[in-house]
Amino acid sequence: MTQKKIYLAEDQMPEFWYNIVADMPNKPLPPLHPATGEPIGPDALSPLFPMELIMQEVSQERFIEIPEAVREKYLLYRPSPLIRATELEKAMKTNSRIYYKYEGVSPSGSHKTNTAIAQAYYNAVSGTKKITTETGAGQWGSALSYACNLFGIECEVYMVKVSYNQKPYRKIMMNTYGASVFASPSERTAAGRKVMLNHPESNGSLGTAISEAMEMAVSDPDTKYALGSVLNHVLLHQTIIGEEALLQFDMADDYPDIVIAPLGGGSNFAGLAFPFLRNKLQSNSDIRAIAVEAASCPKLTRGKFMYDFGDTEGLTPLLPMYTLGHNFESAPIHAGGLRYHGASVLVSQLLNDGLVEASALTQNECFSAGQLFAKTEGIMPAPESNHAIAQAIREAKACDEKGEIKTILFNLSGHGFMDMASYGDYNAGKLADHTLSQEEIAHYLSEIQALQPQLMA
C-alpha cells in the first residue's frame, strides 16, 4: 500500500498566531529613535501603521487571536498542505524522511499572503485609504496588491529595479490586482532621486525601496505603510504556517528533528520555525532550526549583530539585528527576496543566543536542488525556496553519512511559475555565484559603526 503523502488538517485551522517573544529567554533589545538613541514608544510608529498592528509589534502576549474576517479570507487557500517528499527521498536514496509545507497554494503564490491579508484588514478597519510598500522579487508586492483589493484599499508598490526588469510578469500580476508599480530607485521620491544622482547605474535595493515607500506614506494622512518581513507583527502573522504544521505532524504521527526555511528578512523562517521553537523553549525538545540565506547577502553568517536602520535613508528606527549595513546593495541574484541587508530583530536575537542556526548557499547549488525537486515532486519552486531545498538535501546527505535517520521539514514558501527566466539562465549556464570579500563586508559595516548606542555594548 502506498504511504500517505499529503496532510491537510482541513477542520483544524489555527485560531491564534504565536508570539515567540513570550518564550524568549532574552527579550529583544528595543528599537531606538535615530536622533536621540532613546527607546521609542508605540506613538512613534503611528504615522506608518494602524494602532492594532503597532500593539502587536510590541506585544509580549503568547497567543494573539486571528480576527474572524482574516480567518474567512485564509479559508480561500488554507490550510496549506504538508507533503512528504517521497519521490525526492527515492531519488536521493536517503533513509531520512523529508516533508515540505507548501505555501505556493495561496492566491499570490507564496507565504506572503498570510500577513498581507492581516495587514490589509487592520488598515481597512482603521480607515486607511492607501498603502505603500516595497518588494524585492515581487512576491510581497503581489500578495499585498491582492489583499488590498480584497479590502478596497489602494496599493502602491516600489519594486527593486533589478527585479522589476527580471520579473515583468510580477508587475503584470500586481497591476491586475489593481496596484501601481514603480521601479526603485525612482524619480517619484527624494530618496529615489538621491540614489539615482549618486549611483546612476544602481540596480536598487530593498533598503531604497523601503525609503521610497515610507516617504510616500508619511506625506499623506490617509496613507499607511506595510512591510512584508522583518517586523515582529509580520513574523507573528506568518506563524499560521508552523501552527498548521504542528497539527499536520500529529496526523502523520511524526515530528521534525530539523526545520529549515529561507531567510530574507525573517518572516518565511519565523512562520514555519517559531511554533516548533516554542516546544523547544518550553520543554527543551531537541530540534534544530536552520535559516538559509544567500551567499551574496550573508548577514546572519558574516554580518554583525548591531543597531542599524531598516532602510537606506535612515527613516526607520534603529533596530538591533544582524546586518551588512543599510547601504549594502546585493548582487543581482534571482532570489530577489533574499537580498535584504538585515534580519529581523527576533531571529537575530535567537541566533545570537544560539537557539537557531544559519547557513549561506550559492545560487547554482540552490537551482540544482530546485531542478531536482521539480523533476521528482513536480513543483517548480521559487528561487528563494530553492535555498531551503538545497539545505534539506545537505542535511539528509549528512544524516546518511552518519548512519542517522532524521525527519526534515522545510518551507516551500512559493512556486516559481513567475521565475522561468531564472531557470532558463540556470539551464543555459548563465548563473554566476556571488560571494562577498571580507573587505567589502568591513566597508559596509564601518559606515554604521557611529550609529551604535551604548545600550548595545
Image (cartoon, grey):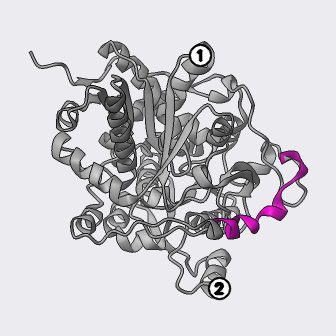
Above or below, 182 relative to 69:
below
Q: Please provide the residue range marked out in magenta.
A: 441-456
The image shows residue 147 at horizontal and vertical percentages of: 44, 47
Q: Amino acid at mark 2?
A: Asn
**Residue 168 seen in the current view:** yes
Q: How many marks?
A: 2
Above or below, 249 relative to 452:
above
The image shows residue 440 at horizontal and vertical percentages of: 62, 70
Instruction: Give the residue number, with chain letter if any, for mark 1.
Output: 284
Task: Name the residue furthest front.
Answer: 402
The image shows residue 351 at horizontal and vertical percentages of: 63, 39
The image shows residue 329 at horizontal and vertical percentages of: 57, 69
Q: Amino acid at mark 1?
A: Asn
Disc 1 packing (10 Å; few <14; some 14–19; many ≥20):
few
Question: Where is residue 256, by image quadrant?
Answer: top left
Residue lying at 35% horizontally and 46% vertically, measured from the top left: 390
Asked whether residue 452 is drawn in magenta, I would say yes
Instruction: Give the residue number, with chain letter if any, for mark 2.
Output: 198
Question: Where is residue 20, by image quadrant?
Answer: top right
